[in-house]
Image: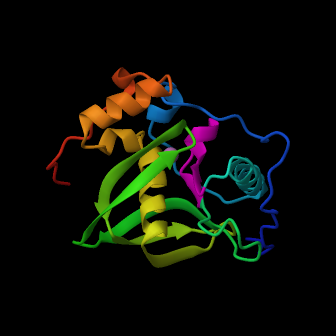
Amino acid sequence: MATTAPLLVEKVKLAKAPLEMHYLGDRVLRQPAKRISRVDDNVRELIVKMLQTMYTQDGIGLAAPQVGFNKQLIIIDVALDEPTVPPVVLINPKILGSSREIALGQEGCLSIPNVFLDVKRPAAIEVSYKDENGRPQKRRFDGLPARVIQHEMDHLNGVMFVDRVESDIELTQALSKEGFAAKDVRPVKKGKKK
Ligand code: NI
């Protein structure tokens, strides 16, 4: 039986995030994540800790591999200033379709602090997933939520947003300024058809 208790996590910064972050160069970020077979209290406990960790660091999205869990679980919240708007939890997310329209937008990542660069992605997506209560959902997202979900879903495949940055010069400069190594980038091949 799935429970239906809402996730009550205050959107506040804690003195210390409950989960430890992993950063670019860390192998856990490059492994494909495993499906979650059952959404139980352990999974919900992880979701709560991930939300607290994300809010503490002012993030708008977080994927389980970033906090060391090799699971297909992502959370997003693009309304950090609105306490009553709930976050969106996506378990085993799958993209059913993408818009032909491509949008360019700036991205950052809690696993690559202070690096912000432009990335091209489909402007809208349709996604199937299970929510925090294990119920199947199908929803269309566009604008910022579509971008964040695609970014977080990349994490589940071991892909980082810097792998998609087209400007090599800007990328190398931004990474070295923050102490990250350009060798830890694994460029996504362009024009690859699925
Ligand atoms: Ni990220």
Q: Horizontal placement of 194 versus 30: left or right?
A: left
The quarter of the rendered structure image containing the C terminus is bottom left
Q: Horizontal placement of 2 versus 31: left or right?
A: right
Q: Is 60 in front, or is 64?
A: 60
Where is residue 22 drawn, in percent x and y?
59, 32
Q: Reply yes or no: does residue 71 show up in magenta.
A: yes
User: From where the camera sits, is residue 46 visible?
Assistant: yes
Where is residue 28 drawn, in percent x and y?
53, 30
Q: Is residue 179 above or below residue 122?
A: above
- Residues shaded magenta: 60-75
Q: Reply yes or no: does residue 43 show up in magenta.
A: no
Q: Is 177 in front, or is 133?
A: 177
Kindly indicate the quadrant of the structure image that contains residue 44. bottom right
Where is residue 74 drawn, in percent x and y?
57, 55
User: From where the camera sits, is residue 70 visible?
Assistant: no
Residue beneath the point at 76% across and 77% down: 84
Residue beneath the point at 62% across and 73% down: 135
Kindly indicate the quadrant of the structure image that contains residue 122. bottom left
Q: In this view, does 11 lie above or below 172?
A: below
Q: Is residue 96 above or below residue 47?
A: below
Residue beneath the point at 47% across and 78% down: 139
Where is residue 152 drawn, in percent x and y?
49, 52
Q: Is 98 in front, or is 117?
A: 117
